[in-house]
Amino acid sequence: MAGTFTLVEFGKLAEVKKDKLLDSVARTLIQESQPMKYIPWETIGLLYRKLIRIQALPSVSRRKLNSAWTATTGTTEVLSEGLSIVGGNIDVDKELVEGNQTIEDVRALQQYMKVQALAYDFNDQFINGAVISDEDTFDGLKARCDRADMSAQKLVSATTTNLITDSQAHALDFIGEMDRLFDALDGHSPTFLVTNGVGLRKITQALRIAGVLKTDRDNFGQLVILWGDAPIYDMGVQADQSTKIMGDEAIGGGAWSSGNYYFSIYAVKIGEGTHFWGIQKHKLEVKDAGLLEDMVTYRTNVNWPVGLACVNKRSIARLYGVRHA
C-alpha cells in the first residue's frame, strides 16, 4: 500500500536524512533489531486496526444448460489489532550539556541509550508481548501461536529425546522437523526465522553435521545462516543485557522434561495486508524540545504508536521442543 515503509526505506527518505536526530534514531533501531529490518509499517491514523480474515472459501458450483447458478459465500471473521505507544523523554541537566568537558556528547549518548532500550523492548514484545497480561502492549509471536485457533501453527518437535548435534542421523531428523515448520507457512516460504543464541549455534552445528550448512550476506550485509533462502537470527537479550528474549525451555512429559534443555524456532512470513506486518498510528517521531521552562533540563522526546497485524494464520509458526543439551 502507498505510504508503507520498512524502517530501512524510511531512513532513506530525504526529510529523514535532513533531520539528523530522526535519522540517528532510525539507524539505531535498524541496527539493534533484526525484525525491524523486515517489517513494513502501515500508517493507519488510529490506535487500532480492524481486519477481515478468511475462514472458509465459498464452494464452486456447476450448472446444467438453462439452469440457474446456486449462490455460495465464504465465511470470514473480524479481528482487531491494537497499538502500543512506546518511547519517552530523554532529560539531561543543562550543566552536563553546556560547557561539556567529556569526550562524548552527553545528550547524544543518552539519546542513543534510550533508542537502544526501545529496540530491545520491541524485540522482547515481538516474541513475548501478551495483551492478556499487559493491556498496554501488543501480542507477540508466542501469544499468537498459543491461541486455540492457531494450534496448527505450534509444532512440537519429534526430536525431543534426541540431541540434534550428537549424530548425523539426529541432525537429519531435525532437518525433517524444520521442513514441517516451513510447511506450516503459506507458500512454505518464510521471510526470516528467529531463535535464541544456543538455538542458532545448535542449528549451525546440525547443518554442518548434515553437510548442508549455508551462509551468506543478508540484504543488510550481515553474515547469516540460511535455511533455504531464509536467514536465521538470534533474538538476543533484553535491555538488562543478560536475560534472553527467548529463554531455554522445558517441555512436559518425557525423560528430559525436568530441565531447560530445549529451544524454539519461529518462522515469519512478511506481507503487508496479506500475511504479517507492522501497524503505526503515525511515523516515528523524534523531537528536540531544547531547554525547558525550568531552565534546568534539556529534553528530547521519542514517540511511536506501533503494533503488529496478522491476517493470515499461516504467516507465523513455532517449532518447539528442539533439544540442545
Image: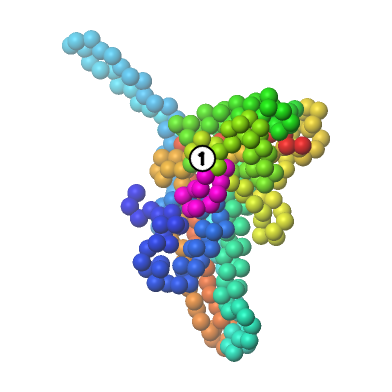
Total labels drawn = 1
Q: In the rendered image of this protein, does residue 22 appear above or below residue 52? A: below
Left or right side of 124 for 43: left
Secondary-structure class at tag 1: strand
Bounds of the magenta segment: 216-225
Evaluate whether residue 198 shows in this view: yes
Tell me the quarter of the image containing the C terminus.
Answer: top right
Q: Residue at x 37, y 63 (%)?
A: 13
Q: Which residue is mark 1?
A: 230
For this orientation, the residue located farthest to the front is: 211
User: Residue 222 in magenta?
Assistant: yes
Left or right side of 19 for 153: right
Residue nearest the observer in this picture, 73 or 223: 223
Residue 243: percent from left, percent from top: 71, 53
Evaluate whether residue 307 shows in this view: no
Rendered image quadrant of residue 210: top right
Residue 120: percent from left, percent from top: 61, 57
Hey, what amino acid is under mark 1?
Ala
Q: In the rendered image of this protein, does residue 139 appear above or below residue 303? A: above
* Mark 1: few/some/many CA within 10 Å (<14, 14-19, 20+): some
Q: In the rendered image of this protein, does residue 147 appear above or below residue 272? A: above
Q: Residue at x 25, y 17 (%)?
A: 69
Residue nearest the observer in this picture, 25 or 210: 210
Q: Residue at x 58, y 88 (%)?
A: 98
Residue 304: percent from left, percent from top: 50, 62
